[in-house]
Amino acid sequence: MLSRTANNLYWMARYVERAENTARILDVAHRMSLVPKESRLADQEWFAPLNITGALYPFSGSYREVNAAGVLRYMVLDPDNPSSIYSCARAARENARAERGRITSEMWEVINGTWLEVQGMREDRIASDRVGEFFEWVKERSHLFRGVTVGTMLRDEAYYFNRLGTFLERADNTARMLDVKYHVLLSSAQEVGGAVDYYQWAAVLRSVSAFESYRKVYRDVITPLRVAELLVLREDMPRSLHACMNEAYEILQRMSGGEINEAVRRAGEMHASLHFGRMDIIFASGLHEYLTDFLHRADLLGREVNRTFFSSGSQRAAA
Amino acid sequence: MSHDNFFDEMFFPDGSVRPHYAAVEQWIADTPPERIRRMRDAANMLFHRVGITFAVYGEEAGGERLIPFDMLPHVIPGDEWRSLELGLRQRVQALNAFLHDIYHGQEIIRAGRIPAERVLGNKLFRQEMVGLNVPNGVYAHIAGIDLVRAGAGEHYVLEDNLRTPSGVSYMLENRKMMMRLMPELFARQSVAPVEHYPDLLLDTLRSVAPPQVENPVVVLLTPGQFNSAYFEHAFLAQQMGIELVEGPDLFVEDDTVYMRTTRGPKRVDVVYRRIDDDFIDPLAFRSDSVLGVPGLVSAYRKGRVTLANAVGTGIADDKSIYPFVPEMIRFYLGEEPLLNNVPTYQLSRQEDLDYTLAHLAELVVKEVHGSGGYGMLIGPASTERERDDYRRRVLDNPASFIAQPTLALSTCPVFVDQGIAPRHIDLRPFVLSGKEVVMCPGGLTRVALKEGSLVVNSSQGGGTKDTWILEGE
């Protein structure tokens, strides 16, 4: 298939997934901010979404204070922030529009409908008493898009590049989400093991819809090591790094027709380290360091996918 | 229901129904008006949802409109179609022979049948094509010939469209819609199918691939999603199962054309291009074009890729050449033309210019290089002021205009809020030329929806109808 088409479908899916995950990240911060605490620490949680998405610096360019209203405004509605939910919805729709003949009409209607609603959204949708409901809506639209994709799309290259975008974006976001806890700890310097600590780990689990799964798998109290194990190493946990890399590795092998190119090799390497990893060993050298390294590798893999599949052609033509 | 001065496709002048419309009339009589209204609404909604829209130039940027669709079919008896088809094939064959000739020996000019400066001095004559051999000697692979019926019922060719004729997607979508809305009518009589058009087109395109190519790869080259006919480009590519590419998706290396795919560069043998000559290759034509593919024309000239339609076909559908088409048929085929030309005044001639300026209010005046209904004057519908403005434009450069008598185009009924009413129509059948010449029975019927209007162009407020060729009559 055309590189341009594959590229558009891949990014369409990535933007949908990114909008969902931005909603999830903000949701954790929102939940954490509701835990009672000293007033001088009141807005500390809101540094986390900016830190983990690398948005603190650009945010500070246009907003003075880090607080709930500012961060929500910037990460939900700001058209100048390229990873705001608004911008993601727009970018997903632009990519979909360019490939209308390639996607099913149901997919188009979901993406177009989401954009039309986000475009017409007003400030009061992100007021603190309503914003939780809005996050639910974003997640539902993303669920709907995936459901419609899986339920209606022919299993050809177009389908697989679309799915590849979903899983690479999701792996990136789960890693960042798990790191929220690290950033919150850093900024609030709270004691480990207290009630607040417990509540925050629970919030992380809820943010990736894993709270019930945790109970089912461990039937025990929430400990950091198990939370990390669930979200990193458990392949039966659909948003875990392992599950995402299972899918991404398989798709890349399929799209390369048996050839081991650099994209396949990198994905295989990441997959193997998750497949054979042990959480106590990861913890010994630091979870934050592990996640930072994973994000770096995910970024390199993304570049390799781009080079291998989306920019084919002669040197001269590509220059 | 009859209309005094015009030939009506459905009714005899005395108001009785022509036999080939009997089933349609019966259906109208049997169907409650309320149901017809609901069907019209449903049709509009469906067309909107599928996104069959077109962009209109000269309006607000990004303006998308639905081409209005009328449910009453344009019905043509089988025997009448067969004689039209013969005339169309003859005409397109002569036009292709003409294109081959003027880019080679120029016999027709040497025989004095067409003035040399009319061809060689025309900006649509492409020097790049001189001496170039194209597969099967075919230049206009896809031709859309606009037919009208006038006066007592004789057909005329209004114009030949040999560059990038569009509209065939409406022919296909309209038929799909009609079969959905009134299946009982299709059961009652035998309407020739058109659904195989994409297959015919793909066969035609594959048949003109460069020689020695085993399994030719065909792509459709579009200017992109902001082009007025983008919907049709995407639709046809999808129906044929070929890639819809934009300029940047293709590149040329060692005079071979490749598309960039997820499996690396893939060779392309035939480009069904829906981009004008001027924009197709910035190295050969307009250097500011970002739509084209650098090096494409060079690869083409080396015979490494086929362009459909060929570069330089515009010279044959230019309105200053149009008056000579009957002469081409006699010259190349040794036959008498089966289809009439509309009498045409060539304003490069003094006596034609004088006559035209004296009769502006009765004539239709068109720009020689124009198309799509832009920039024409319809005398009988014009105001004094419009005629004065137009007169000035003509006098500026008379050779770039022609004039024709205002034809009494035939009418066909359309559904209006109060039953049915006659509106003027024309018909664009499509002629495909590859190894052989093939046609789909039917075409695009365009209808001027404004009462009394003679302009059927979609860009000027026209609509469309399904066209039925009845089989076995």
Image (spheres, helix red, strand yellow):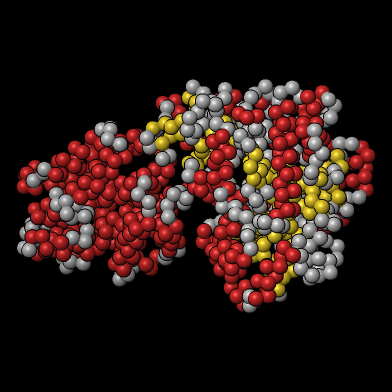
Which quadrant of the figure has residue A190? bottom left
Determine whether A88 is above or below B433 in the image.
below
Measuring 48% from the left and 24% from the top, which residue is drawn there?
A: B253
For residue B415, side relative to residue A88 (left or right): right
Question: At which x and y percent is residue B368?
Answer: 78, 40
Quarter of the image where the C terminus of chain B is located: bottom right
Q: Is residue A289 visible?
A: no
Q: Is residue B101 visible?
A: yes
Q: Choose between B327 and B41: the one closer to the eye.
A: B327
Q: Choose between B21 and B411: the one closer to the eye.
A: B21
Determine whether A311 is above or below B174 in the image.
above
Determine whether B107 is above or below A188 in the image.
above
For residue B327, side relative to residue A94 (left or right): right
Q: Choose between B466 and B248: the one closer to the eye.
A: B466
Question: At which x and y percent is residue A94?
Answer: 45, 51
Measuring 63% from the left and 75% from the top, which residue is drawn there?
A: B31
For residue A290, side relative to residue B373 (left or right): left
Measuring 49% from the left and 22% from the top, which residue is drawn there?
A: B254
